[in-house]
Amino acid sequence: MTQSCMYSMTPDEDYVIDFLGGEFGEDAVVCGGFSGHGFKMGPVVGRIAAELVESGRAAGVELRHFRIGRFAGKCKGNVKDFDDQVKKSH
């Protein structure tokens, strides 16, 4: 069995930086949707994530655009079935 390269990408191809519950300063911090092009942003996203964990906000950074809720009711994302991702050898 072989499996194609798995990556995460949001429908608008932008990142998600938010709290899991959707409220800034509450719940767990989640950062994702970076696929291949987000690698270069690792240091700054790491700083933002650390500040969010520590204080619930990231100084000087506007994060509204990166909220999870921006997709609510608009689309299901790039969800694929497992069978679409795996080729079975016979």
Image (cartoon, helix red, strand yellow):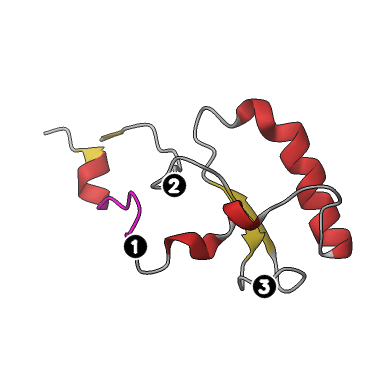
Q: CA distance from mark 2 to mark 3?
A: 19 Å
Q: Which quadrant does the N terminus fall into?
A: top left
Q: Residue at x 51, y 28 (%)?
A: 36
Query: What amino acid is at disc 1?
Result: Lys
38, above or below 15, in the image: above
15, above or below 77, in the image: above
Percent across and percent down for residue 54 are 88, 60
The region drawn magenta spans: 75-81
In the figure, is residue 53 to the left or right of 31?
right
Q: Nearer the viewer, residue 59 or 21?
A: 59
Q: CA distance from mark 1 to mark 3?
A: 20 Å
Q: Residue at x 38, y 47 (%)?
A: 11
Q: Nearer the viewer, residue 38 or 67?
A: 67
18, above or below 83, in the image: below
Circle nearer the N terminus (2, 1): 2
**SS label for mark 1:** loop
How many C-alpha atoms fall within 10 Å of the one at disc 3: few (<14), some, or many (≥20)?
A: some
Percent across and percent down for residue 55 are 88, 63
Residue picked out by circle 3: 23
Query: What amino acid is at disc 2?
Result: Thr
In the figure, is residue 9 to the left or right of 73?
right
Residue picked out by circle 1: 74
